[in-house]
Amino acid sequence: LAYVLGFVCAAAIIYFVAKRWKLGMSEDNLLTLMVCAIVGVVLGARIGYVLFYGNGLEFYLQNPLEVLAFNHGGMSFHGGLVGALLAGIAAAKMTGIPYLTLADLGCVAAPIGLFFGRLANFVNGELWGGPTDLPWGVVFGGAAGTMPRHPSQLYEALLEGVLIFAVLFMLSRRLPPRPRGTFLGVFLIMYGCCRFAIEFVRQPDVQLGYLWGGWLTMGQLLSVPLVLVGIGVLVYALRMKKPQQGLPELPQGE
């Protein structure tokens, strides 16, 4: 349900922003983009989990069908991001809209999907935070025990979802639109920073624990490159100043 809500809301936001930017994006273009995004996100998220968070390469070599066992859980945001960016290449070729313009549109909408995803993590009682005595601590029960814990899923929903969306959507209101790649760069920087910070109060995955001397998590390790790449993309966008570009709008009636 979280994925369905996320993709439906993302499609609506992309269509709205593309119309404001006068990109001439048709419903067919939007459908093509969303199909590519769905395939890229789902496959990328699962493969990313298998590579970075799963039970080890040997386990999946012995049980290859487990790679596609979505019903067993396990999806990685970082993998989903890479999958979406790769799928965007195909979408750009099929629609004729420049890759960075599609990436910018996707980044404005992506935080909505993150918001619903983190709410689902909270409802499922998974990816909880460390113990806390703060008044909003939550007792998740089960493997989390009976002690109150940080509702780190809600922290992520607010920072990765609400905050990033608010910033990017506000930036998207400027006309003419900001240079191509601006939104991709800002998204990568903001997500990497938010995720890195929240990992300090979120319990690491049981099968991995803490890395590098007991203070760094896999989520933090994967978020550092996002910030660095985001800075590079943002610098490129501001230097090149390539305008957002879509398809010429057809006259009414055609």
Image (tube, rainbow, N blue to C red):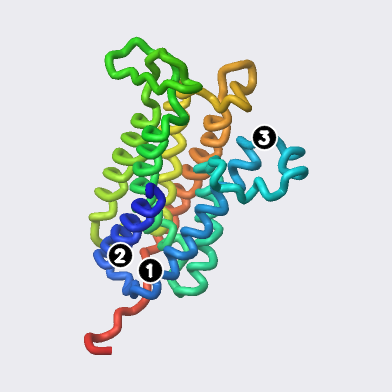
> Which comes sooner in the sequence, label 1 or label 3?
1
Give percent across and percent down for residue 224.
Answer: 53, 34
* Residue drawn at point x = 39 percent, y = 27 percent: 152
Dot 1: element? helix
In the picture as drawn, the residue positioned furthest to the bottom comes out as 254
Q: Is residue 189 left or right of residue 172?
A: right
Q: Mark 3 and mark 2: span between their CA atoms?
A: 40 Å
Q: For residue 206, what is the image quadrant?
A: top right
In this view, the residue in front, 172 or 140, is 140
Residue 190 makes an appearance in the image: no
* Residue drawn at point x = 28 percent, y = 54 percent: 172
Residue type at tag 1: Leu
In the image, residue 82 sits, relative to residue 226, either above or below, namely below
Residue type at tag 3: Asn
* Pointers 1 and 2 in contact (C-beta within 8 Å): yes
Tell me the mark number nearer the camera, choosing from 1 and 3.
Answer: 3
Disc 1 marks which residue?
A: 30
Q: Residues within 10 Å of mark 1 (few under 14, many from 20)?
A: some
Give percent across and percent down for residue 2.
Answer: 38, 47
* Residue drawn at point x = 31 percent, y = 48 percent: 168
In this view, the residue in front, 5 or 230, is 5
Residue type at tag 2: Tyr
* Residue drawn at point x = 46 percent, y = 24 percent: 202
Give percent across and percent down for residue 28.
Answer: 38, 75
> Which comes sooner in the sequence, label 3 or label 2?
2
Disc 2 marks which residue?
A: 15
The label number, if any, that marks residue 55 in the structure image: 3
